[in-house]
Image (tube, helix red, strand yellow):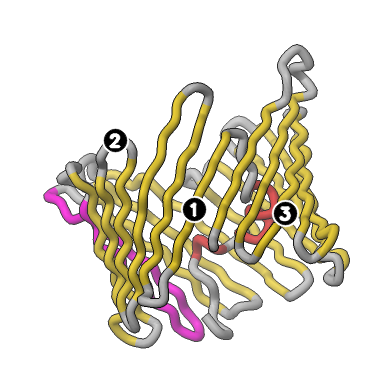
Amino acid sequence: MGSGPAPFSDIGRRARDLLTKDYNYDQKFSLSVPSSTGMQLTATGVKKDHIFVGDMSTQYKSEKATVDVRVDTYSNVSTKVTYDVLPGTKAAISFSVPDQKSGKLDVHYLHRRVAINSSIGLNPTPLLEIAGAIGSKDVAIGGEIAFDTTSSSFTKCNAGISFNQPDFSAALMLTDKGQTLKASYIHTVNPVTGTEVAAEMIHRLSSFDNSFSIGSIHKIDPKTLVKTRFSDNGTVAILSQREWRTKSLVTVSAEYDTKAISIGPKLGLAIALKP
């Protein structure tokens, strides 16, 4: 990306990741095994209530191409091939078997003043999507639209603007076809300890409802971090993550609804191993 803007999907991502990323209330285990030939094998299993699902995926990287193949518990096979067409331009074809309508072509273009992502379904009645952002890494404005040719209607119409500095990031987005306004902010309090705070406020223009969440992250030591989140609906969440060896993580999450004291907290455990 360099000095250019990030893709539209990255507007507000820093605050969004602090508030939501890695929170998990199931039991999850993943094992990734890389190789010197550019191929990586990953096995993932998730136990949710009394149901266990899993998948096996492989990724192969060469100088200009990346191939991803994933097989899940229900014998669905998903494949994605990404190719660097030109400097700053990537094209990707993806499809799933046995879903005959899942084929999709994506094109990503990054320039020092613009970032464009486009997608078209490879079927007789495709979904067309395009997103773009202009500006720089410090200030960017963009939007995205999606058009469903089956219903001849726009299914997505969003816009946003972001301001970014090393110690803070602010974003304002208009989503849900102009029905929802989202504002987010993240600030680095102490770069030495990795302490950051973030907040997100959502205002629904149609119903005049408001909601907000605030959160924080703090590194206890170089390999251990703690995250917290408080929401206006009364939920409180906490997460602790430990890198017990390089790229191998153990994450424990908990969430408690203070308005439903008769219900116990949600607990989750995620273990990611990478030898």
134 vs 131: above or below: below
100 vs 8: above or below: above
Front residue of 89/136: it is 89
Read off the magenta span.
Answer: 103-124
Mark 1 / mark 3, whichever is N-terminal: 1
Name the quarter where the C terminus is drawn. Answer: bottom right
Left or right: 2, with 75 as reference point = right
The answer to if 111 sits in the magenta stretch is yes
Q: Amino acid at mark 1?
A: Leu
According to the picture, the residue beneath numbered tag 2 turns out to be: 74
Q: Residues within 10 Å of mark 2 (few under 14, many from 20)?
A: few
Q: CA distance from mark 2 to mark 3?
A: 32 Å
Left or right: 50, with 18 as reference point = left
According to the picture, the residue beneath numbered tag 1 turns out to be: 31
Left or right: 157, with 199 as reference point = left
Q: Residues within 10 Å of mark 3 (few under 14, many from 20)?
A: some
Residue at the image position 50 percent from the left and 49 percent from the top:
30
Check residue 242 in the rendering and tell me which mark sits there, or answer none.
3
Mark 1 / mark 2, whichever is N-terminal: 1
